[in-house]
Image (cartoon, rainbow, N blue to C red):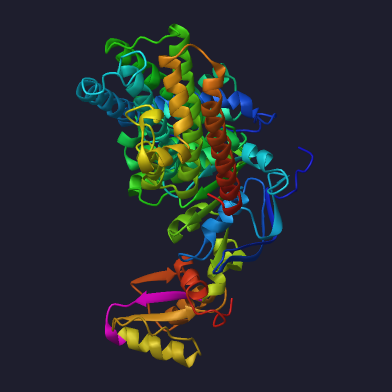
């Protein structure tokens, strides 16, 4: 491909107004080839509207976007040919079997009947779906339906895959299975993935970068670890053999100017905020130099949930992103 | 769960945008399979019309001696029942679309690169096939009840064709309503509009035997010309002049239906799925 460095998804000032509200405000977004990008945000923040615009289901009110090199408004057919989409909720005819759905999808993606049959067989094997290939999807479990849904989205070997809350309603085992498949698509096959999710653990596990939407605006976009670093300091918790030792440690650390973390309430434990790299090791050495040895220690990182709560759920204008 | 085999994804995507005409066959076949898997769509219009045909013929033929030009009341009442089939069976396309919208599969189809007009044309074509079968079955029942058209087999074929032509307009109207509303009851309302109209016409007797306000109602009822044209196929020698007004009304309904379907599709494209 000539445009090796070109983003797989590029939105410039993309927006959508509905009669009574603006769902997405002038969104600027770039997702690189092979990247897994997660869009996070509370209900009504514009995640699904963004996906619907990028997948040509919904015309934008303003702005432009290219997906897999094609403009979503000028060349929507090419966008639809080069992208796969897994929609929120299973978008399958419950009366049709996986085999019928895959073959029909192949025909609608310009495969001949023979090619569609071969493609169907490949996908059924890849998704371990032969066992229920001829059962109406309405009779399958939620996890099985999701696998069929993902297989249908991959019929045309898409360059870009959109997943709109793909694991909602799945049991933990099915969710983990789907994660493995998404990772494999990105890592082994270079498929660019844009997913929306309500599950922060999912975004943390899967995404190279995440963007946080609030009220239709992209208020943060970075790698999960970078966002976590913005969210606050790590917290080191030391547990001593008794409350006396803990008290000595607390006095010593306070005298050194360390910032005690007050959330830890156990009398034989001390928690401090680690404001700089290497602060954990320095603290342990300081305590050891006066004979104070912790029996155990833990370091808590800020989670993506902390980031999300701080950025997405605080009132507009009250955050410092 | 296994991870995905190398063959499943990759850069070798199809290079050509698919031809929408080529996609119409598989989509129509799929709509037909949906009809077969939803027996109510197939049987309900047929059984309703067959029921009325048997009841009307059984109860009214003895008291309407002399009403029919050939003396057989079935020649008068079969066209009415075919007309009923046309607008009850015409709901098929709308119901198929509503079902797809409800399951989310319509959105999946909307995301394929084929022309979106195929998504409304396919269920309409499937409805045409179903309607043809329903009209043929009802005509067959008419033959069992003593139907004997003056113009022979040609008249029977023309009768089925007229039913399908009229029904196609209703199919398009119902498809437009289904696509616009996504609501099964709204699609059913298309039938509800036309069903009463079928009683404000020469329902049980030829129009020249109607009197008073009913004669005036029949004169302005748009269903009267098609009904009379269909009757003329059975009760009179072949005459294009008898068929023309009915054909024009059927074509007008077809044009209105097509325009409504086009508008519904345009609106859905604009507002999104």
Measuring from the top left, give residue B207's x and y in whole percent: 40, 30
Image check: B41 left or right of A66? Answer: left
Q: Residue at 60%, 30% (x, y): give it.
A: A109
Q: Residue at 66%, 33% (x, y): give it.
A: B11
Image check: A85 left or right of B210? Answer: right
Look at the picture and state if B35 lies above or below A211.
above
Q: Residue at 32%, 11% (x, y): give it.
A: B143
Quadrant occupied by the N terminus of chain A? top right
Measuring from the top left, give residue A273's x and y in whole percent: 47, 80
Image check: A193 left or right of A198? Answer: right
Rendered image quadrant of residue B118: top right
Segment tinted magenta in the rendering: A233-244
Number of numbered discs overlaid on the protein picture: 0
Is residue A234 visible to us here?
Answer: yes
Image check: A209 left or right of A297? Answer: right
Along the viewing direction, whichever of A307 and A144 lies nearer the viewer: A144
Along the viewing direction, whichever of B168 and A275 lies nearer the viewer: B168
Measuring from the top left, give residue A148's x and y in whole percent: 43, 35
């Amino acid at each position: 491909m000539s445009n090796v460095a070109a983003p797989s998804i590029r939105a410039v000032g993309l927006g959508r107004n509905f009669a009574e509200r603006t769902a997405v405000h002038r969104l600027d977004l770039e997702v690189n080839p092979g990247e897994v990008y997660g869009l996070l945000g509370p209900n009504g923040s514009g995640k699904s509207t963004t996906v619907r615009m990028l997948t040509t289901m919904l015309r934008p009110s303003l702005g432009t976007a290219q997906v897999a090199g094609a403009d979503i408004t000028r060349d929507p057919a090419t966008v639809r040919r080069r992208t796969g989409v897994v929609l929120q909720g299973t978008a399958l005819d419950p009366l049709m079997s996986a085999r019928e759905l895959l073959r029909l999808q192949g025909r609608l993606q310009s495969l001949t009947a023979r090619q569609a049959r071969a493609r169907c067989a490949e996908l059924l094997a890849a998704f371990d779906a032969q066992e229920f290939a001829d059962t109406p999807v309405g009779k399958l479990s939620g996890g099985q339906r999701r696998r069929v849904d993902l297989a249908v989205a991959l019929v045309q070997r898409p360059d870009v895959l959109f997943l709109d809350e793909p694991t909602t309603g799945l049991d933990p085992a099915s969710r983990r299975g789907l994660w493995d498949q998404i990772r494999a698509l990105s890592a082994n096959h270079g498929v660019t993935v844009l997913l929306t999710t309500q599950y922060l653990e999912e975004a943390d596990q899967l995404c190279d970068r995440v963007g946080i939407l609030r009220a239709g605006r992209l208020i943060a976009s970075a790698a999960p670890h970078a966002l976590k670093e913005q969210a606050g300091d790590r917290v080191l918790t030391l547990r001593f053999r008794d409350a006396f030792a803990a008290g000595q440690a607390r006095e010593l650390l306070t005298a050194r100017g360390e910032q005690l973390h007050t959330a830890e309430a156990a009398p034989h434990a001390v928690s401090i905020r680690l404001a700089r790299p290497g602060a954990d090791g320095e603290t342990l050495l300081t305590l050891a130099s006066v004979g104070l040895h912790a029996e155990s220690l833990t370091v808590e990182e800020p989670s993506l949930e902390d980031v999300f709560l701080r950025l997405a759920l605080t009132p507009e204008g009250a955050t410092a992103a | 769960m296994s991870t995905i085999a190398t063959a499943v994804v990759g850069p070798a995507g199809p290079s050509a945008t698919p031809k929408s005409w080529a996609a119409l066959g598989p989509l129509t076949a799929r709509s037909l399979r949906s009809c077969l898997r939803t027996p109510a769509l197939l049987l309900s219009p047929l059984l309703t019309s067959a029921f009325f045909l048997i009841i009307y013929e059984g109860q009214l033929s003895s008291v309407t001696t002399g009403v029919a030009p050939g003396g057989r009341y079935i020649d008068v009442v079969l066209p009415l029942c075919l007309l009923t089939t046309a607008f009850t069976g015409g709901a098929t396309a709308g119901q198929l679309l509503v079902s797809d919208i409800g399951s989310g599969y319509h959105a999946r189809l909307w995301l394929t690169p084929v022309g979106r007009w195929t998504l409304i044309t396919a269920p309409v074509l499937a409805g045409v096939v179903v309607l043809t079968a329903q009209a043929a079955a009802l005509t067959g029942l008419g033959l069992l009840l003593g139907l004997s058209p003056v113009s022979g087999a040609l008249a029977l074929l023309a009768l089925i064709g007229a039913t399908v032509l009229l029904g196609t307009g209703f199919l398009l109207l119902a498809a437009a309503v289904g696509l616009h509303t996504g609501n099964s009851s709204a699609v059913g309302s298309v039938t509800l509009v036309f069903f009463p109209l079928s009683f404000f016409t020469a329902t049980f007797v030829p129009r020249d035997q109607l009197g008073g306000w009913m004669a005036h109602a029949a004169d302005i009822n748009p269903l009267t010309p098609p009904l009379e044209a269909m009757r003329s196929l059975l009760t009179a020698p072949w005459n294009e002049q008898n068929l023309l007004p009915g054909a024009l009304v059927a074509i007008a309904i077809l044009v209105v239906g097509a325009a409504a379907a086009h508008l519904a599709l345009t609106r859905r494209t604009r507002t999104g799925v």
